[in-house]
Image: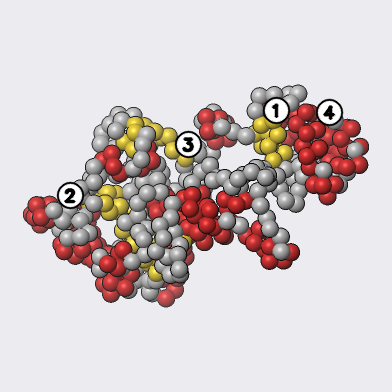
Amino acid sequence: MQSPALAPLTGIRVLDFTWALAGPFATMQLADLGAEVVKVEYPETHEKERGFGPYHEGISTFFFSPNRGKKGICIDLKAAEGKDLVRRLARQADVVTENFRPGTMDRLGLGYQALREVNPRLVYAALSGFGQTGPYSAMAAVDAVAQAMGGTMSLNGERGGPPTRIGVSIGDMVGGLYLALGILAALRARDLTGEGQMLDVALMEAQMALCENAIVRHSAFNEHPTRQGSRHALLAPFGPFPTRDGHLVIANVKEWELFCALIERDDIALDERFATNRGRLENIDALEHELAVALMKKTTDEWFAIIEPANVCAIGKVNTIADLFEDPHVAARNMLVDLPLPYGIPGTLKLPNSPLHLSQTPTVVGKPMPGHGADTAGVLSDWLGIQEQELERLRLSGAVK
C-alpha cells in the first residue's frame, strides 16, 4: 500500500502575525504547501472585524479567501505573559511573519533581534510598504499606493488617459508572493548554513520588479514608457478586440497573411501600411479599427473555433469571473475548490485552488479559515506542552483567548 504523499512544507511551523491581504496571501501559499501556519490575532477582535465585507453568513469574504488552511490563536501582544508566550512559540517556529509598520515589533520587544536570541534558526519575514530602511520606511502603504509608487500604475490605463489601478490587488499580492518566495529561499539557506535570517520585502519594490522591461528601456534608450491601454510597445496587433458578443485577445501574430484570410479580410494583408510589424505599430489606430470591424461579424466562440486551430497567433477569450465557473479547462485542472464555512455553518464557498501542480508532493487546499482563537488551546499544547490549568489561568489574565 502506497503511503499518502507528503506536502512540500510538511513539518515547517509558521508563526503568522500578518493581517489585511498582502501578508495573509503570502502565508496562504505556505499553508497550501503544507506548512503549519498559526495565525496570531488579538483577543478583543470581534468576528466581523476580522475583514471587510461583504459578509456571507456573518463571515467576511475578504478574510475567508486568503486565510484558508491556517490555525488561529489569540494572544495579547501588549501583556507581559502574552509576549512571553510569543517568545516561547518563536523558539519552536521555523518562520515568523509580520506586516506591521517597521519598528512595531521591535517596540513590543518581539522584533527580529529579540526573537533571534531565543531561536538562531528562525527565518523572520517582514513585509511593509517601503522596506525596513530608507526615507519612506515609516510611511503607510496600501495596494493602490504600492501600485502608484512602484511604477505599475503609470503604465496602466488608456493611452492619453489617467493612471489607473490594476483591477486586482496586485500591489498587495505580488508583495505577498515575493515574501513567500523569500521565505522558501531562506529556509533552503538554513539547510546549508544552519542559521536563520531576516527577510525584508517592500510592496513598492515588488511592483518595480514587474516594471523590468520599462525600466531597462528607459535605461538603454531614455524612453519614458507610459499608458498604452492593452497595446504592446513592440508588437501589433496585441490586445482585446470586440466580437459580436464579447472580446477576444489577439497577440503575437506570426502568419499575418493567413490570419487576415481567417478573419475574411485579405484586403488588410494587401495594405502596405500593415505589411510589417513596424508598419502595423506606426498605423495602429487604423489597424485596430479594421480588425474591430472584421471581428464584430462573429461571436467570440465562433472566431475562437476558426483561429485557434490554425496556430497563427496567440488567442484567448476574455473570460468574466462567471465564465471561469463554467470553463471546461478550469474544471479539468480542478482550479476551483469548495471550502467549508467555519463554526459549523452549513455550506461552502468556492476559491481558486493553488496553481502549483506538483506530481510527488501535492499542495493541500481544503481547510477553511480558522475560527477566532479556535486553535489556541491545541497550539499551546502541541508547541509548548501547556496544560488546561495553565491555559485557564492565561485566559483569566487576558493574555490569551
- 189 above or below 55? below
Residue mark closest to the camera, 4 vs 3 = 4
In the image, residue 127 lies at what x, y percent?
A: 41, 60
Residue designated by label 2: 401
Q: What kind of element bears circle 1?
A: loop
In the image, residue 159 lies at what x, y percent?
A: 68, 44
Task: Say if mark 2 contacts mark 4, CB within 8 Å.
Answer: no
Residue designated by label 3: 336
In the image, residue 212 lies at what x, y percent?
A: 62, 60
Residue 347 found in image quarter: top left
Seen from the viewer's position, the closer of residues 162 and 273 is 162
Q: Closer to the N terminus: mark 1 or mark 2?
A: 1
Q: Closer to the N terminus: mark 2 or mark 3?
A: 3
Q: What kind of element bears circle 3?
A: strand
In the picture, the disc for residue 123 is none
Crowdedness near tag 3: few (<14), some (14–19) or many (≥20) residues, C-alpha within 10 Å: some
Crowdedness near tag 4: few (<14), some (14–19) or many (≥20) residues, C-alpha within 10 Å: few
Task: Say if mark 4 contacts mark 1, CB within 8 Å.
Answer: no
Q: What kind of element bears circle 2?
A: loop
Disc 1/disc 2 C-alpha distance (Å): 56 Å
Disc 1/disc 3 C-alpha distance (Å): 28 Å
Disc 2/disc 4 C-alpha distance (Å): 69 Å
Q: Closer to the N terminus: mark 2 or mark 4?
A: 4
Disc 2/disc 3 C-alpha distance (Å): 34 Å
- 287 above or below 204? above
Residue designated by label 4: 264
